[in-house]
Image: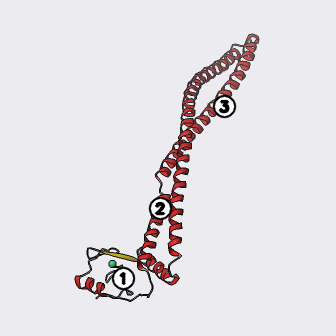
Amino acid sequence: MVRAGTWHSQSMDLRALFDVQRLDTAINQARHARANLPELAVQTSAAGKLGTIRARSGDLSREQGTLESEMAAIEKRDAEIATHLARLEKQLKTVIAPREAEALQHQMKNLTFERESADERGLAILDASSVAETALIETRAADAEAARELAAAEASLRDAEKEADRVIAELSVARADLVASIDASDLAEYERLRATHSGVAIAEIKHGVCGGCHMDISASELDAIKRLPADQFAECPNCTRLLLR
Ligand SMILES: [Zn+2]
């Protein structure tokens, strides 16, 4: 059976509260849209892209630095070897004992081998450095492009946020205007019901169905609702939302 008049107020304007609810729903939707703007996804993606490029730039710069240090070490060692070899050559001219000469030659051979290996490594470093330099130039171009894209995405996001804020403000003003003419206790009751009924305190009956819970209201219940005096309200027998006639 319909529980009619469980909550009633002689002067309560259910229609006005229904309009408040409509605005509240619109405000919620606008806030949700504001937090999930497509422009935000574009901006996040652009920021991520730029971040990836900058990380790659950093890696390449560090690689360049490592190669440069290694090259400097090779050059330093090469100079040391050159000095050492010159000294050994001088010494070789003065030794008489064949064993001593042999030992010096062996030493010189080892140093020459070390020098040749270092030269090979030096060439490999130059190659790697050239590859890294080319990649770095490309990365810098990509960085500039990605930075432009991000700036554009940020500008679009700011515009979209501004527009969303304007819509929310407009709806909020309309709500405040409407609420000004509604009894405070009626409004409080509406708020209480809204909080416990997933944002829908007042439901319309459409084709014999409650707009809040979408359950059928029987013919006899509908009939009883129609017979209620104008100052009384029926609750949905299923979800207890207030029914707008
Ligand atoms: Zn219902």
At label 3, which amino acid type do we have? Ser
In this view, 77 is above or below 60: above
Which residue is rendered at x = 54% and y = 67% of the image? 173
Q: Quadrant of residue 201?
A: bottom left
Which of pointers 3 and 1 indicates the residue nearer the eye? 1
Mark 3: C-beta under 8 Å from nearest atom of ligand 1: no
At label 2, which amino acid type do we have? Ala
Mark 1: C-beta under 8 Å from nearest atom of ligand 1: yes
Between marks 1 and 2, how big is the CA–CA gap? 27 Å
The residue wearing badge 2 is 30
* Number of residues whose C-alpha sits closer than 10 Å to that of mark 3, classed few (under 14), some (14–19) or many (20 or more): few
Which residue is rendered at x = 61% and y = 36% of the image? 62
Q: Estimate the x, y position of residue 143 in percent, counting from the top left.
A: 56, 37
Query: Looking at the image, is mark 3 or mark 2 earlier in the sequence?
Result: 2
The residue wearing badge 3 is 69
The residue wearing badge 1 is 240
Which image quadrant: the C terminus?
bottom left
Q: Estimate the x, y position of residue 116 in percent, counting from the top left.
A: 60, 20
| Residue 57 or residue 37, whichever sits in front | 37
Q: Estimate the x, y position of residue 31 in percent, counting from the top left.
A: 49, 62
Which residue is rendered at x = 68% and y = 16% of the image? 99
Q: Secondary structure at mark 2?
A: helix
Determine if residue 53 is in view: no
Determine if residue 16 is in view: yes
